[in-house]
């Protein structure tokens, strides 16, 4: 499940156009939070903790409206 969540997060960060066409309700991402690195940033959409520096280089579209 980590691989799927990370792939989708990175696809959003890279602004791939096909991401908007996905129906995430049909994608099995498992349940609960996943951790790639300790003390990282928890992405609220995919519930995966990623390195904070990498995350700040690009804001996923689902967080732009939050700031």
Image (spheres, rainbow, N blue to C red):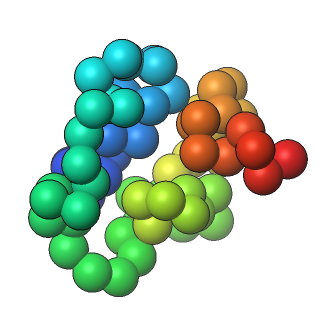
In the rendered image, the vertical position of residue 18 relative to residue 23, given as above or below = above
**Residue at horizontal 75 percent and vertical 44 percent from the top:** 65
**Residue at horizontal 58 percent and vertical 36 percent from the top:** 60
Q: Taking the image as drawn, is residue 7 in sight?
A: no
**Residue at horizontal 85 percent and vertical 47 percent from the top:** 67
In the displayed structure, does residue 9 sit left or right of residue 55?
Answer: left
In this view, the residue in front, 26 or 52, is 26
Q: Quadrant of the N terminus?
A: bottom left
Most extreme residue toward the bottom, as rendered? Answer: 32
What is the quadrant of residue 7 in the picture?
Answer: top left
Most extreme residue toward the right, as rendered? Answer: 67
Residue 23, position as x, y percentages in the image: 24, 49
Q: Taking the image as drawn, is residue 21 in sight?
A: yes
In the displayed structure, does residue 67 sit left or right of residue 11?
Answer: right
- Please give the count of numbered marks on the rendered protein: 0
Residue 39, position as x, y percentages in the image: 63, 65
Residue 11, position as x, y percentages in the image: 36, 28
In the rendered image, the vertical position of residue 8 relative to residue 57, given as above or below = below
**Residue at horizontal 63 percent and vertical 57 percent from the top:** 41
In the displayed structure, does residue 32 sit left or right of residue 53?
Answer: left
In the rendered image, the vertical position of residue 20 relative to residue 16, given as above or below = below
In this view, the residue in front, 2 or 39, is 2
């Amino acid at each position: 499940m980590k691989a799927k969540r990370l792939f989708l997060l990175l696809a959003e960060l890279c602004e791939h156009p096909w991401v908007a066409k996905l129906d995430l309700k049909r994608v099995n991402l498992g349940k609960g939070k996943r951790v790639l690195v300790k003390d990282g940033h928890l992405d609220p959409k995919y519930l995966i903790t990623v390195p904070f520096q990498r995350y700040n280089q690009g804001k996923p579209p689902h967080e732009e409206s939050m700031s």
